[in-house]
Every structure is written in C-alpha cells, then in structure tokens.
Image: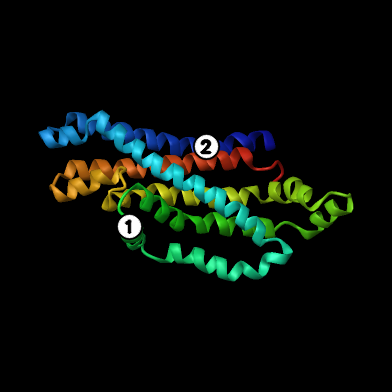
C-alpha cells in the first residue's frame, strides 16, 4: 500500500507543473501569432521580458532571504520559555504588515525611504514575514512535550533537542508558511513598479497607461505563472523534506 501511495502523491504536483507549462506555451503561441504594434513588440521582446523577470526575481529573492533570516530565528526565540510573553506585541507588529493594503504599505515606505528598489524590498519583507513567523511558532508549539522531555532525559542539551527533535517535527508546518510567503512575495512584487522598484509589474502598468491589452494580459499571466511555479517548487520541497511517517 505504501509503495503505491508514494507515486500517487506526486500526481497533483505533476499536473500543476503540466498546467503551468501548457499555459506558458499557449501564451507564447498567442503572442507569436498576434499582430503586435512596435510598442508592444519592444515591450514584449524576449530580452525585455528576461530583464523584467530578473528584476522581479531579485526583488522577491532578496525579500525572501531577509524574511527567512528574520522570521525563523525570531519564531524559535518566541517559543522559548522566557520569551513567550513577547508573543503578543511582536505578532501584532507582524500582523500590521499583512493587515495594511499592499499598495498603501509600499507607497508609505517609499515616501519615507525614497522611491526605488530598497523601499520595495522593505515593504515586501513586512508584507510576507507573518506567515513564516506564525508557522514557525505553531510548528514548534505543536511538538509533543513528552518528546522534548524524553530528549532532555537522555542528556541532550536544549539546543540539541531543538535541532534534533523540535525542528524536524515542525518542518512541514514551517515549510507551508514559507511557501505561502514566497507566493505572496511574487504576486505583491508586481506593485513595486508604482515606486520605480522594477519587476514584471511594469508590463501591467504599461498595458493600462498606454491601452495595450496584449501587454496587460501578458504581464498578468506571466506574474500568475511565476507565482504558481514558486508554489509548485514549495510543494515539491514540502513533499521531499517531510519526515518519514508524518
């Protein structure tokens, strides 16, 4: 039964990847067959799309790195006995980033930090930090205390129990939060164009401002496909990294 169940669990992932590839190919065929204006042809040229995609990935990649380096250690600290009293205030600050409208948060930070890449990264970090922080705390808090006590009873240090018992058991929940944050980052990064932060959002704003429906549709679909692909990668990592028996 288990030998048959493993391949079946990959089927949704393969179907999701196939759907992403099919939509991407259809988009490319549609653009290749369409009678594009000179402006559309320049905006949607392979070199331009590659540059916009690189900017988009740079935004999301840097923001994701900062989120992971901040939220995971902070989530671990907030589950330690002496620091749990700070959970409420810190989660309230993290909730502010998610509760505020993304475009409003980006514009407010741009007015403070100046328009450009830096303000966009800071806004993205504030917007995506909550899922990682919350899931890290939930994942560690749901670990059976009897397992922790058993580890300590075997002579393991608090750090050893954390690394060898708590974190491995918390991995599935933590990865789900990381995947959610990455998808949020990819989608929200499209708004960075409003503060000259770069990225694929320029296709959407160009399509709207110049009344170029093909550019608008292409930009929207590419951002959606990129978010779906990141979600697919996250699901693959969750599937592979999930401890056996869970």
Name the residue at 48% across, 35% down.
Answer: 14
Q: Vertical placement of 186 versus 79: above or below?
A: above
Please identify the quadrant where the N terminus is shown.
top right
- Label ID, residue 11: 2
Disc 2 packing (10 Å; few <14; some 14–19; many ≥20): few
Q: Earlier in the sequence, mark 2 or mark 1?
A: 2
| Residue at mark 2 to residue at mark 1: CA–CA distance | 43 Å
Q: Is residue 188 visible?
A: no
Residue 144, image x, y percentages: 76, 58
The image quarter in which residue 54 lies: top left
Q: Which residue is mark 1?
A: 110
- Secondary structure at badge 2 equals helix
Residue lying at the far front of the rendered structure? 113
Q: Is residue 215 above or below residue 148?
A: above
**Foreground label between 2 and 1:** 1
Residue 234: percent from the left, percent from the top? 52, 42
244 on left or right of 190: right
């Amino acid at each position: 039964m288990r030998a048959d169940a493993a391949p079946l669990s990959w089927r949704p992932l393969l179907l999701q990847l196939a759907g992403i590839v099919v939509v991407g190919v259809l988009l490319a065929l549609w653009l290749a067959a369409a009678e594009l204006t000179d402006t559309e042809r320049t905006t949607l040229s392979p070199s331009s799309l590659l540059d916009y995609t690189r900017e988009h990935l740079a935004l999301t990649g840097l923001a994701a790195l900062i989120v992971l380096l901040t939220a995971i250690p902070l989530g671990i600290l907030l589950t330690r006995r002496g620091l749990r009293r700070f959970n409420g205030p810190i989660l309230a600050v993290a909730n502010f980033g998610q509760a505020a409208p993304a475009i409003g948060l980006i514009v407010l930070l741009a007015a403070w930090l100046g328009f450009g890449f830096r303000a966009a990264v800071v806004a993205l970090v504030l917007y995506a930090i909550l899922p990682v922080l919350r899931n890290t705390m939930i994942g560690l808090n749901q670990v059976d205390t009897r397992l922790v006590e058993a580890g300590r009873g075997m002579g393991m240090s608090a750090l050893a129990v954390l690394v060898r018992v708590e974190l491995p058991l918390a991995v599935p929940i933590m990865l789900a939060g990381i995947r959610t944050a990455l998808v949020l980052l990819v989608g929200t990064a499209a708004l960075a164009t409003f503060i000259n932060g770069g990225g694929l959002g320029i296709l959407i704003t160009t399509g709207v401002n110049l009344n170029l429906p093909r550019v608008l549709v292409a930009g929207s679909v590419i951002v959606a496909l990129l978010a779906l692909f990141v979600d697919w990668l996250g699901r693959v990592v969750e599937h592979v990294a999930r401890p056996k028996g869970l």
